Image (cartoon, grey):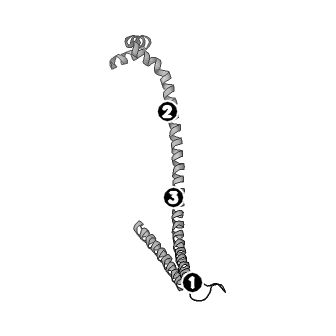
Amino acid sequence: MDEQARKTKARVDNLNVQITVKEKAKATIKEVDAMGHSLPLVPGVHFTEAEAAKLKSLAKKGVGIDKRADEYKEKIAALDTKIISLNSQITSLKQDVSSIARDRDTWKANYERLWAEVKGFIHAIRRAPQRLMAFINEHLPNTQNKNREELR
């Protein structure tokens, strides 16, 4: 099933659920409207028309609240799923950061080790480049000296 068909099916299923919920709510409201005939709910207890109307109004609001509660439950479930996904992403990103920090520390240690090895040579080049070249030419075998002079 391709992506578009899957999305369309999911949307149709969602609409069917909404229609079912609305039909149940209408049926419940019709039942509430049908209430309030002259029969007492409890022997000896009677309601005035105003009390019966208020009771019906409150019952209708209760039906609406139940419907909204179901919608909120669905939203909460969707948000819970999203939270799980985001927590998974956070865990993955934390692992990436840890890996990057280890790599950074390794490169920094290598840099510091190499700098310690060559800093004397760099300082010598900056202070007295001719004296350093003379020292190198004096202490290296002739074959390497020729190669060095050719590079100049």
CA–CA distance in space, label 1 to label 3? 51 Å
Which badge, 1 or 3, comes first in the chain's sequence?
1
Q: Report the residue at 45% width, 70% height from top.
A: 10
Name the residue tied to disc 1: 48
Q: Position of residue 37 (x, y in %)?
A: 56, 88
Q: Report the residue at 43% width, 16% height from top.
A: 123
10 Å crowding of disc 2: few (<14), some (14-19), many (20+) = few
Nearest the camera: 7 or 49? 49
Please say if the residues under marks 1 and 3 sit with CB atoms less than 8 Å apart: no
Q: Of tags 2 and 1, which is closer to the observer?
A: 1
10 Å crowding of disc 3: few (<14), some (14-19), many (20+) = few
Residue found farthest to the bottom: 38
**What's the residue type where badge 3 is placed?**
Lys
Q: Is residue 142 visible?
A: no
Q: Report the residue at 59% width, 83% height from top.
A: 47
Q: Of tags 2 and 3, which is closer to the observer?
A: 3
Name the residue tied to disc 3: 82
Q: Position of residue 147 (x, y in %)?
A: 36, 18
Which badge, 2 or 3, comes first in the chain's sequence?
3
Q: Is residue 68 above or below residue 100?
A: below
Q: Position of residue 61 (x, y in %)?
A: 52, 74
Circle 2: element type: helix
Circle 3: element type: helix
CA–CA distance in space, label 2 to label 1? 86 Å
Q: Is residue 125 above or below residue 6?
A: above
Q: Is residue 83 above or below residue 30?
A: above
Task: Please identify the quadrant where the N terminus is shown.
Answer: bottom left
Q: Report the residue at 51% width, 78% height from top.
A: 25
Residue 107: which disc?
2
Nearest the camera: 96 or 44? 44
Q: Of tags 1 and 3, which is closer to the observer?
A: 1
